[in-house]
Image (cartoon, rainbow, N blue to C red):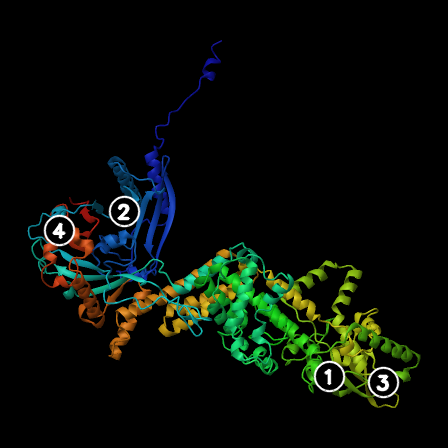
């Protein structure tokens, strides 16, 4: 009965080795140090001068936790080239760890940009453990000690020689304690941070006392202490230098200038001084104790005599800059929701009886050829009367733009309106529409990268005017008002056949913004309508696809390049764009009908007998081809006058491709698509038939698409070599589009064909499109032009200053903008980035000008000195801190000295320091003595004391000791690194 009892007993083992939270924390620290390979002896070369500033600092982080309290552990280190280890294998057995050697290194005191621990201790590498959350803090002393013990144990266990710090107290106080261990040595890093400075620590002698006391060296003649002192002076008052940029005078209106700025130009420069302060640091790098006396009664530290001067400038945060403001305000327009009608009241675009018709022709008198004395036709009178009507119509008391401004802008946009009009418009159409060929330089071609408009075009000028009006003359209301006037002017020009100035000839340029394409389209319509209204007939008005008369090879070459196009092969748009004003005439539908009837009759007759075909009267010939003869009658082949293809803007092209895509892939769909695409081909075939009676498809193909006609040498029956030709394989495909089109084509010359391009309908579509644009749409259309103008302005200003860093940023802006603006509807965020980049460049150039003015670079007569000053100013812009060659005695030094002297004279008691002076502390009394009166009291005092002494016992190893002190108006900090021998103590 007792036998099963022992089996049921549970045998328990209590494990007393379970790790506590503290031990786990230590092991995590060790784990991270192992992962980062920070174990073992650290080796490295002595540091070169300035490497902390020029070198690259990197950091890596991890997260560890003590129970549920999270810490981040970060390794900060200077990236160094790996040293040659082979030669350094025989390390001295008791060599000091690198961090201890760094404590004494004097090559990198006061680095301008570095982690505070680098500045305070001069370390090239260290690890920091800090609370992970920003608002967490280790406040109690026991917790601080616990963390310090953890660090100490982890360093001891791993043999890591990299200093390990723990951040204690609130983060803003930047309080750290830490430790570094080496073979038989240890350095403790300690810190004191106070708000109020004890009097004895405001001078060197007091700091030396505390340093010596802390070391507690038992040796009677204490080894000498090496001292480095830096005093920093701040200049905030640039009394004698007013800021050179004058804000534009908004009321001034002289000639073409409004607000001190010409229309068509962007402003540039900062409205306030972009440099707010100059910090001068005077440094005494190697002082031995006893060489300099500084106590509460007397000081030898005269800034003018300091061997090293270095300067940094404090830049104003986001200085207000004109170009930046212009861009930002214009960009804000893009977010407005109101339409032009909502902004201006009822629309002046509505056609409501005669009154509105009068308004829509308000500007017509500007360009109407009439024998009226020119003074009565002044722009002001006309616009003024129009204004009254528009105001009455709107029910608004006052127009957003006053007449003077409006007239100036309209004359700037439409310079042709100001010329004498008595001889009619005809005499100057060529100058107003056909601009001079553009300069082929990189800046001019920027528009194709930005998808904006050429810098001499109407669209570009309009963008600049709207930008200026938005800023100076009524904001969004002014923009809506000018746009309304602009659209009225467009309609007036269309109705009266006046070409729009400032636009390149030819079809819309798809490299430009859509608005520019629409205006070009309107100009094409005006050209065609004008030609029709003037009753132009004849050969000049029409073009053949082969380009220039007498150059039949051109069309042939083009056709040869792409024989697979089923469309009008050889009629690329480029071949049309170089035509001077050319038009074709198309008669009314009834005439068309009659013509077709006659042709049908003739065609019917032709079918009966081929001989009669030759009797058809040839029509619409441009010129003989020169080389080719018709295959059957053997007569010369004539190139016909053909209709030009319809010009298209990118939105129409998209629309067309959508329609074609919707037809699907079925055979029927494909056939329909081919029919739609062959309208131009059919027109050209009809023209060709009319010009060459008795021709066949082979004749047409030989001219239109030479690659589709294959010629071979064959031997005939008589043994002679003859050339035999035939159509290509694709032309022989049954029910091929070309054959079908050829069969349906009638011999009708271009002038009697139905128009391929209905200019009336297209012009009305463009005018409607313009009329319904809201100010926000307009701003979006024109923003690329404004960015383009801003980039050109920045480039122009930079050329005057020649700042290498700015050149790089401008290149970045151009490449960034090209990527963003090339696509429709770019994201607002990306546009904001571009504007911010342009603003930063403007601020840099403004700073350069400010510093040039302050240092009198342009006034300097000695060429060598001028170059030195220019170099100094450029360095100030690009580097965090610049050393002054020759300290207080060099050219830059003497200018800085004068700046401080003048500021001191102006205000003997600077307001910032009044309280300090009232307290009349020993430091103040000391600083008021002697030459120091040229300078204000130092804003910051930094002292580094270093020595090597045995600690803690006289027979211990001599080890580096260092103390850094910084004293500013707000706080006082003592930072010490004290080493001790852990073997002989």
Does residue 211 lie above or below 725 as drawn? above
Taking depth in this image into account, of 200 and 589 the one nearest to the observer is 589
Q: Nearer the viewer, mark 4 or mark 3?
A: 4
Q: Earlier in the sequence, mark 1 or mark 2?
A: 2
> Alpha-carbon neighbours of circle 2 within 10 Å: few (<14), some, or many (≥20)?
few
The residue tagged 2 is 174
**Residue 492 left/right relative to 468:** right
The residue tagged 4 is 918
Q: Are dots 4 and 3 in contact, CB under 8 Å?
A: no
Evaluate whether residue 551 shows in this view.
yes
Does residue 379 lie above or below 81 as drawn? below
Q: Dividing the image into 4 quarters, which one contains the C terminus?
A: top left
SS class of the residue under badge 1?
loop
Q: Earlier in the sequence, mark 1 or mark 4?
A: 1
Which mark is on residue 632?
A: 3
Q: Nearer the viewer, mark 1 or mark 4?
A: 1
Q: CA distance from mark 3 to mark 1?
A: 28 Å
Q: Earlier in the sequence, mark 4 or mark 3?
A: 3
Q: Are dots 1 and 2 in contact, CB under 8 Å?
A: no
Q: CA distance from mark 1 to mark 2?
A: 89 Å
The residue tagged 1 is 538
Residue drawn at 17 percent across, 58 percent down = 229
Q: Nearer the viewer, mark 4 or mark 2?
A: 4
């Amino acid at each position: 009965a007792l036998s099963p009892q022992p089996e049921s007993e549970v045998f328990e083992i209590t494990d007393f080795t379970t790790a506590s939270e503290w031990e786990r924390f230590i092991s995590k620290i060790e784990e991270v140090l192992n992962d980062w390979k920070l174990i073992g002896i650290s080796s490295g070369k002595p540091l070169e001068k300035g490497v902390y500033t020029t070198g690259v600092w990197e950091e890596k982080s991890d997260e560890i936790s003590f129970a549920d309290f999270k810490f981040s552990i970060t390794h900060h280190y200077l990236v160094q080239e790996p040293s040659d280890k082979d030669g350094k294998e025989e390390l001295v057995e008791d060599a000091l760890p690198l961090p201890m050697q760094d404590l004494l290194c004097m090559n990198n005191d006061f680095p301008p940009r570095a982690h505070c621990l680098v500045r305070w201790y001069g370390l090239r590498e260290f690890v920091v453990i800090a609370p992970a959350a920003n608002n967490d803090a280790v406040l109690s002393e026991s917790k601080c000690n616990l963390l310090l013990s953890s660090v100490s144990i982890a360093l001891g266990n791993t043999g890591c020689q990299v200093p390990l710090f723990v951040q204690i107290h609130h983060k803003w106080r930047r309080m750290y304690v830490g430790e570094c261990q080496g073979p038989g040595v240890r350095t403790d890093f300690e810190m004191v941070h106070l708000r109020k400075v004890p009097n004895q620590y405001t001078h060197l002698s007091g700091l030396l006392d505390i340093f010596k006391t802390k070391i507690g060296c038992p040796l009677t003649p204490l080894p000498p202490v090496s001292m480095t002192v830096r005093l920093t002076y701040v200049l905030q008052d640039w009394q004698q230098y007013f800021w050179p940029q004058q804000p534009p005078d908004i009321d001034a209106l002289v000639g073409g200038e409004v607000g001190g700025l010409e229309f068509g130009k962007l402003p540039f420069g900062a409205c306030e001084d972009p440099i707010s302060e100059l910090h001068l640091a005077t440094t005494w790098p190697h002082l031995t104790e006893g060489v300099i006396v500084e106590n509460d009664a007397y000081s030898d530290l005269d800034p003018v005599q300091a061997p090293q001067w270095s300067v940094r400038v404090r830049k104003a945060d986001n200085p207000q800059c004109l170009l930046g403001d212009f861009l930002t305000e214009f960009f804000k327009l893009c977010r407005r929701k109101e339409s032009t009608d909502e902004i201006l009241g009822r629309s002046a675009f509505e056609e409501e009886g005669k009154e509105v018709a009068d308004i829509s022709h308000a500007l017509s008198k500007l360009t109407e050829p009439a024998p009226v004395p020119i003074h009565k036709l002044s722009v002001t009178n006309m616009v003024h009367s129009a204004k009254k009507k528009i105001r009455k119509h709107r029910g608004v008391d006052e127009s957003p733009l006053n007449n003077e401004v409006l007239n100036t802008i309209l004359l700037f946009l439409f310079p042709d309106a100001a010329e004498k009009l008595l001889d009619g418009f005809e005499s100057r159409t060529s100058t107003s529409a056909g601009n001079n060929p553009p300069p082929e330089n990189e800046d001019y071609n920027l528009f194709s990268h930005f998808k904006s408009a050429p810098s001499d075009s109407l669209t570009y000028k309009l963008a600049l005017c709207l930008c200026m009006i938005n800023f100076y003359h009524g904001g969004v209301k002014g923009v809506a008002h000018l746009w309304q006037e602009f659209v009225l002017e467009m309609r007036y020009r269309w109705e009266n056949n006046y070409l729009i100035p400032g636009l390149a000839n030819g079809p819309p340029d798809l490299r430009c913004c859509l608005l520019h394409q629409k205006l070009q389209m309107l100009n094409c319509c005006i050209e065609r309508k004008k030609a029709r209204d003037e009753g132009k007939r004849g050969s000049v008005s029409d073009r053949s696809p082969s380009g220039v008369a007498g150059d039949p090879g051109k069309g042939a070459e083009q056709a040869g390049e792409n024989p697979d196009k089923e469309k009008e092969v050889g009629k690329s748009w480029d071949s049309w764009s170089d035509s001077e004003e050319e038009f074709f005439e198309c008669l009314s539908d009834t005439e068309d009908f009659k013509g077709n009837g006659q042709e049908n009759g003739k065609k019917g007759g032709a079918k009966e007998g081929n001989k009669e075909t030759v009797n058809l009267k040839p029509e619409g010939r441009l010129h003989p081809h020169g080389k080719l003869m018709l295959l059957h009658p053997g007569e010369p082949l004539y190139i016909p006058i053909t209709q030009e293809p319809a010009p298209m803007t990118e939105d129409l092209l998209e629309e067309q491709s959508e329609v074609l895509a919707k037809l699907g892939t079925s055979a029927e769909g494909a056939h329909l698509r081919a029919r739609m695409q062959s309208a131009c081909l059919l027109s050209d075939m009809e023209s060709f038939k009319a010009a060459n009676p008795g021709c066949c498809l082979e004749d047409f193909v030989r001219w239109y698409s030479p690659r589709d006609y294959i010629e071979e040498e064959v031997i005939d029956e008589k043994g002679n070599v003859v050339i035999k030709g035939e159509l290509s394989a694709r032309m022989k495909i049954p029910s091929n589009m070309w054959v079908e089109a050829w069969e349906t084509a009638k011999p009708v010359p271009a002038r009697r064909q139905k128009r391929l391009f209905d200019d009336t309908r297209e012009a009305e579509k463009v005018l409607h499109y313009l009329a319904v644009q809201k100010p926000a749409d307009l701003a979006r259309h024109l923003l690329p032009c404004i960015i383009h103008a801003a980039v050109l302005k920045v480039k122009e200003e930079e050329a005057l200053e020649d700042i290498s860093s700015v050149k790089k940023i401008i290149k970045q802006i151009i490449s960034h903008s090209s990527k963003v603006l090339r696509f429709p509807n770019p994201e607002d965020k990306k546009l904001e980035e571009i504007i911010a980049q342009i603003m930063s460049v403007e601020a840099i150039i403004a700073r350069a000008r400010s510093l040039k003015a302050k240092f009198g670079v342009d006034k300097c007569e000695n060429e060598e000195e001028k170059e030195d000053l220019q170099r100094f100013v450029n360095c100030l812009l690009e580097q965090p801190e610049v050393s002054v060659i020759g300290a207080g005695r060099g050219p830059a030094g003497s200018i800085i000295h004068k700046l401080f002297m003048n500021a001191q004279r102006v205000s003997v008691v600077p307001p910032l320091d009044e309280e300090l002076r009232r307290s009349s502390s020993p430091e103040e009394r000391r600083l008021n003595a002697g030459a120091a009166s040229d300078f204000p009291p130092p804003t910051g005092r930094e002292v580094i004391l270093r020595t090597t002494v045995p600690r803690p016992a006289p027979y211990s190893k001599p080890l580096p000791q260092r103390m850094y002190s910084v004293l500013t108006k707000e706080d006082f900090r003592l930072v010490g690194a004290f080493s001790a021998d852990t073997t002989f103590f």
